[in-house]
């Protein structure tokens, strides 16, 4: 089955620790995205990557870092500099090319709780 | 960033009723998408719209790209219990260099009573 996987589903970390969230896709999509969702709010874009070894900041990139060494993988690191890291994190991917880039497909999400 | 105003925030309806929700913006959007999210899961794409005035259906769901390009509508006909969830609109603001940069509405929480 083609799709996007995110692991783990739930993650707990102590304040001040960095944590890396995994995102893998086997849809052969070029573009991948990371969003943050807080209760009662819409999704906000953290980082996105349109091609391997390249990525761009989204609207709320401060305190986060990413890498894109492989087409299939786009891990997100939540650093200790992120002031309010507890949230639901969603990874998405899409074809890169014109309007198809806008049609994004999401993974199941990782709920991060920082204690 | 640019905000999308989605309404209503929540709806409580009886099974079999029709549902309407919409998103509006003060700026022109070039793509509109509608997603449904179940609790604790990722959003699932329902309908994608790419042209002003476009009307697209997906089963009991129908969505329209507003003619002004500043709004979009989603209708669900003959609702059933599994329609329960949060519905999000999303849009792309800007030209070709902004492909993939979506702005999301706050969501409409739909509850369907059997």
Image (spheres, rainbow, N blue to C red):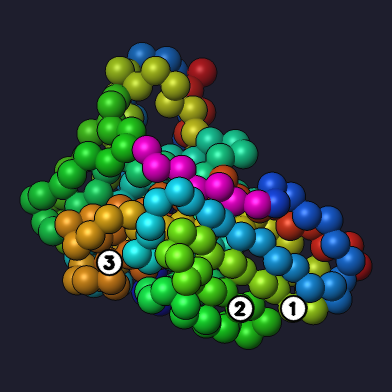
Q: CA distance from mark 3 to mark 2?
A: 22 Å
Is the Cβ of the residue at disc 3 closer than 8 Å to that at disc 2?
no
Image coordinates of residue A115 in percent, x first then y, are 51, 18
Q: Name the mark nearer the viewer: 3 or 2.
A: 2
Which of the pair B18/A16 is nearer the observer?
Answer: B18
The residue located at (53%, 36%) in the rendering is: A38
Query: According to the image, label 3 marks what residue?
Result: A101
Q: Name the image quarter holding residue A92.
A: bottom left
The x, y position of residue B38, in whole percent, is: 63, 57
| Residue B22 visible, this angle | yes
Which of the labelled discs sits on residue A77, or is there none?
A: none
Callout 2: residue from which chain?
Answer: B
Q: Is residue A86 above or below residue A6?
A: above
Q: Position of residue B103 (x, y in %)?
A: 41, 50
* N-term-proximal mark, 1 vs 2: 2
Q: Is residue B2 magenta?
A: yes
In the image, B61 versus A30, the foreground residue is B61
| Disc 3 secondary structure class | helix
Q: Quadrant of the N terminus of chain A?
A: bottom left
What residue lies at 39% left-to-right and 18% top-to-bottom?
A83
Residue bearing mark 2: B62
Q: Describe residue B110's horizontal placement relative to residue B32 as left or right.
A: right
- Looking at the image, residue B7 sits to the left or right of residue A88; the answer is right
Region rendered in magenta: B1-7
């Amino acid at each position: 089955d083609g799709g996007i996987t995110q692991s783990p589903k739930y993650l707990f970390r102590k304040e001040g620790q960095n944590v890396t969230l995994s995102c893998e896709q086997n849809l052969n999509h070029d573009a991948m995205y990371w969003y943050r969702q807080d209760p009662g709010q819409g999704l906000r874009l953290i980082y996105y990557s349109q091609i391997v070894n390249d990525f761009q900041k989204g609207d709320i990139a401060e305190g986060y870092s990413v890498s894109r060494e492989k087409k299939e993988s786009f891990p997100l690191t939540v650093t200790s500099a992120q002031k309010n890291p507890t949230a639901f994190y969603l990874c998405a991917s899409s074809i890169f090319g014109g309007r198809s880039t806008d049609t994004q497909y999401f993974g199941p999400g990782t709920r991060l709780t920082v204690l | 960033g640019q905000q999308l105003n989605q309404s209503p925030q929540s709806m409580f309806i009886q099974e079999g009723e029709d549902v309407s929700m919409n998103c509006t913006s003060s700026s022109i959007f070039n793509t509109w998408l509608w997603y449904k999210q179940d609790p604790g899961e990722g959003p699932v794409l329902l309908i994608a719209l790419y042209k002003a005035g476009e009307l697209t259906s997906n089963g009991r769901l129908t969505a329209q790209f507003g003619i002004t390009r500043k709004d979009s509508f989603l209708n669900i006909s003959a609702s059933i219990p599994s329609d329960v969830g949060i519905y999000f609109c999303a849009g792309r603001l800007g030209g070709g260099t902004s492909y993939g940069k979506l702005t999301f509405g706050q969501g409409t929480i739909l509850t369907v009573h059997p």
